[in-house]
C-alpha cells in the first residue's frame, strides 16, 4: 500500500545508510512509471533512466560519485539523464540548457516521493563526474547524467532535518 502524497512529502528523507535487502524490480518499475509522469516543458520528456542493480557497477558509480560511501551501500540506483537535443529541437538554447534540467529534476522528485510511498529509502546524488558515470553505466554521449537516485531500505530511521520557517521563504507580490 502506498502513502498519501502529502504524507510522502512530509516523510521523505535523504538516507545514506542502507540494509543489504534487494529492491524488487517490480517496485523499481513503479518508480520509473512515476518518473515518466513528471511534467516537462511542452511534454517533450527529454529524459532517459538507467537502472543499476549490479554490485560491480554500483562500485563504479561510487568511484564516479567522488567516492561517496552511500553509493556503494544502496541496493539500486537510477541514473537520471537529460537528452538536451530533444529540448533544443523545441525550445532552442533555453530548452537545451535549462528546460531539460528542470524536467529531469521533476522526474527525480517523483521518484523520491514514489520511493517513500513504497516504503523505500532514497538519496539524490548530484556530486559526480559525468564522464565517469557515463563510462560506468554505458551511457551514450547524447544523454547527460543529471542525478543519481540511490534506492534501498534504510538501516536506521532518518531524522527530520531543520527547515526554514514558512515566513522566511516567501514574498507576496501584489
Image (cartoon, helix red, strand yellow):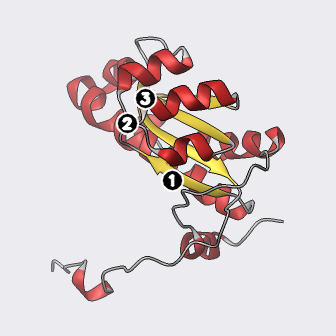
Is 80 located above or below residue 142 in the figure? below
* Secondary-structure class at tag 2: loop
Measure the C-alpha gap from mark 3 to mark 2.
6 Å
Residue 78 x %, y %: 59, 37
Residue 48 is at least partly visible in this image: no
Report the disc number at residue 64. Answer: 3
Q: Is residue 24 left or right of residue 49?
A: right
Residue 16 x %, y %: 54, 56
Residue 33 x %, y %: 69, 42
Q: Is residue 130 left or right of residue 160?
A: left
Mark 2 vs mark 1: which is more N-terminal? 2
Quadrant of the image containing the N terminus: bottom right
Residue 1 is at least partly visible in this image: yes
In front: mark 3 or mark 1?
Answer: 3
Measure the C-alpha gap from mark 2 to mark 1.
23 Å
Report the disc number at residue 109. Answer: 1
* Secondary-structure class at tag 1: helix
Measure the C-alpha gap from mark 3 to mark 1.
22 Å
Q: Nearer the viewer, residue 79 or 158?
A: 158
Q: Residue at x 64, y 25 (%)?
A: 56
Quadrant of the image containing the C terminus: bottom left
Q: Is residue 134 left or right of residue 152?
A: left
Report the disc number at residue 66. Answer: 2
Q: Residue at x 61, y 25 (%)?
A: 57
Contact (Cβ within 8 Å) of mark 3 with mark 2: yes
Q: Is residue 128 left or right of residue 71?
A: left
Amino acid at each position: 500500500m502506498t502513502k498519501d502524497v502529502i504524507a510522502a512529502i512530509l516523510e521523505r528523507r535523504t538516507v545514506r545508510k542502507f540494509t543489504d535487502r534487494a529492491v524488487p524490480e517490480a517496485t523499481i518499475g513503479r518508480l520509473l512509471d512515476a518518473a515518466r509522469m513528471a511534467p516537462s516543458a511542452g511534454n517533450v520528456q527529454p529524459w532517459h533512466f538507467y537502472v543499476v542493480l549490479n554490485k560491480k557497477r554500483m562500485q563504479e558509480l561510487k568511484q564516479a560519485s567522488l567516492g561517496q560511501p552511500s553509493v556503494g551501500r544502496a541496493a539500486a540506483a537510477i541514473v537520471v539523464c537529460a537528452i538536451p537535443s530533444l529540448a533544443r529541437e523545441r525550445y532552442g538554447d533555453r530548452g537545451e540548457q535549462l528546460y531539460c534540467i528542470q524536467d529531469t529534476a521533476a522526474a527525480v522528485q517523483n521518484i523520491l516521493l514514489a520511493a517513500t510511498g513504497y516504503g523505500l529509502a532514497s538519496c539524490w546524488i548530484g556530486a559526480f563526474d559525468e564522464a565517469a558515470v557515463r563510462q560506468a553505466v554505458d551511457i551514450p554521449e547524447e544523454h547527460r547524467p543529471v542525478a543519481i537516485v540511490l534506492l534501498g531500505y534504510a538501516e536506521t530511521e532518518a531524522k527530520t532535518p531543520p527547515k526554514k520557517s514558512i515566513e522566511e521563504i516567501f514574498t507576496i507580490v501584489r
